[in-house]
Amino acid sequence: MTTTYTLRNASPAKTRAEAVVVGVLSSGKGPVVCDAGTEVARAWGRKWLPLLSSMGFSGKPGEAVRIPSGGKLNSAMLVLVGLGPDPDGTAVRRAAGVAARSVPNAASVALALPAETPELVDAVTQGHLLGSYTYTKHKSKTDDDSGAGEVIVLSPIARKADAVSAFAEAQVVAAAVRLTRDWVNEPPGHLTPEGFAAAVTEAHKAATKGRGAPKVKLEIWDHPTLTERGLGGTLAVGNGSDAKPRLAKLTWSPRGATTHLALVGKGVTFDSGGLTIKPSSSMVGMKGDMGGAACVIAATLAIAQLGLPIKVTTFAPMAENMVSGSSFRPGDIVTMYGGTTVEIANTDAEGRMLLGDALVLAVEEDPDVIVDVATLTGHLQLALGDKVGAVLGSQDIVDAVLLAGDRAGEQHWPMPIPEEMKERISASKVADLLQHDWVRWGGGLMAAAFLREFTDGRPWAHLDIAGKELNTGAAYGHVPSGGTGFGVTTIVEYARSLASKPS
Ligand code: BES
Ligand code: ZN
Ligand code: MN
């Protein structure tokens, strides 16, 4: 079922829908209905608080209960979701996601959540769109009724222009996150570099066709082209696979753009580790190793659809890291795009080989700033867990990305690139750079130092999102299990900050 979203200023008690969702805050004195839901609580009168207390509902984040409305409302069902003590955009986005999963198949749902500002309208809309995501493409029995039919976002500012545009833009950004999830979820035998490139071509076509659609240039570089241009890092990694590498380049160049952002994403469609093969259990989930590429591609299309007045050039190298008689080897020396030579020590440190090529390509475009997104190291997953991303690089760009992450409802944390990392990557006796040194400490920081060598000293930030691209546990907030789309909202917010900055 396709879901339609509408924004309306109406009473939650009077709105006709199958279910009405009401947000409830947790306070020291017990649960308190949010302003948007006041009329619903009023419909229960004095029986409201005893009702919540009998169910043990306190308004904590993640809580959700369903209650038949018994004719007290124009909707048959009431859904209460917890907002926590002091809900900001992030809490509202999560609650809307929880709400979406509580009534997955309702014909119509009205959302009475905090939506008094454009930012909150965005949070409610995005939260619902993201929380309701499912990936059923390869299920032979699909439930035709899955998904809500109509979702009504209730907001007191529904008629204001800035609310209307926040509502529309939230849908564009959510679609980009959902697209990223689809690509990450796709099995690696389907989403080979060639399959990924075909999927990008299709998404690009969909985003750029029709009246009013943005003009985004897409190039797919095939294997002969990569060979001819000498993308040595990407070719080395992809050589062991029958599914040969590709590269996607996207350009959004609106008239009048003053700032130029280059994006780079790691597109390893499956990471077996290569000859430095991964232990069996670590290989599970390595279909998500193209999560960085998926993120920057989907974000670029969204930035164009939003019409943001900055230039964006995006490079996504794609390769499969496999084991065969033609795999690259520890001891090999690889000449990267641009001529830097790299001594290979560990074929499982393959991401930096693709990114090195792509960063040099990005530099050649003469951007003002470069941001790369990559599922790069288990080290930074170990350090920060599976919900918080690492950001490394130039201090001012790192700071700006962290701010964007806050607004986008994603958690990121800064990590340093200490002086000694430069020594570690310079320790090769036979090539310009050493790819890996088998020292276990600080591997994520060393990887960033390696990437920095390819950035020409330009303003740059590196987002290591390893472990964030796939949620191996149960759904929470607006994040389903499986592909998460991590990074997309942060990149779009960062692009917005560049677009609004006078330069
Ligand atoms: N794709 C992995 C990193 C990864 C780990 C992604 C966990 C998602 C979840 C990457 O290519 C890799 O294998 N990194 C090595 C780096 C090491 C060889 C320096 C790692 O994590 O051990
Ligand atoms: Zn990898
Ligand atoms: Mn690897």
Image (tube, rainbow, N blue to C red):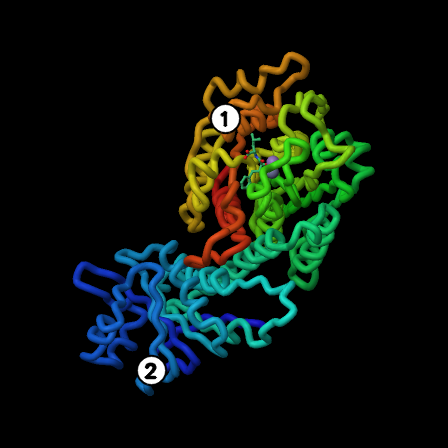
Q: Please tell me which residue lies in front, 187 or 416.
A: 187
Element under label 2? loop
Residue 466 vertical placement versus 129 (above, below): above
In this view, the residue farthest toward the top is 429
Q: Please tell me which residue lies in front, 301 or 3.
A: 3
Q: Residue at x 29, y 66 (%)?
A: 24
Q: Quadrant of residue 182?
A: bottom right
Q: Amino acid at mark 1?
A: Arg
Residue 90 vertical placement versus 463 (above, below): below
Image-based side of 206 in relation to 392, left or right:
right
Q: Quadrant of residue 100?
A: bottom left
Residue 80 vertical placement versus 235 (above, below): below
Q: Residue at x 45, y 45 (%)?
A: 386
Q: Residue at x 47, y 56 (%)?
A: 479
Image-based side of 66 in relation to 193, left or right:
left
Residue 69 - label:
2
Q: Residue under label 1, please give it.
A: 440
Query: Where's residue 309, x and y in %?
Result: 57, 47
Element under label 1? loop
How dense is the environment of label 1, judged by Cα within 10 Å: few (below 14), some, or many (20 and up)? Answer: few
How dense is the environment of label 2, judged by Cα within 10 Å: few (below 14), some, or many (20 and up)? Answer: some
In this view, the residue farthest toward the bottom is 71
Q: Please tell me which residue lies in front, 227 or 7.
A: 227
Q: Amino acid at mark 2?
A: Ser
Q: Confirm whether residue 137 shows in the render.
A: yes
Mark 2 or mark 1, earlier in chain? 2
Quadrant showing the N terminus: bottom right
Query: Where's residue 31, x and y in %?
Result: 23, 66
Query: Where's residue 441, x and y in %?
Result: 47, 25
Give the quarter the ligand 2 occupies: top right
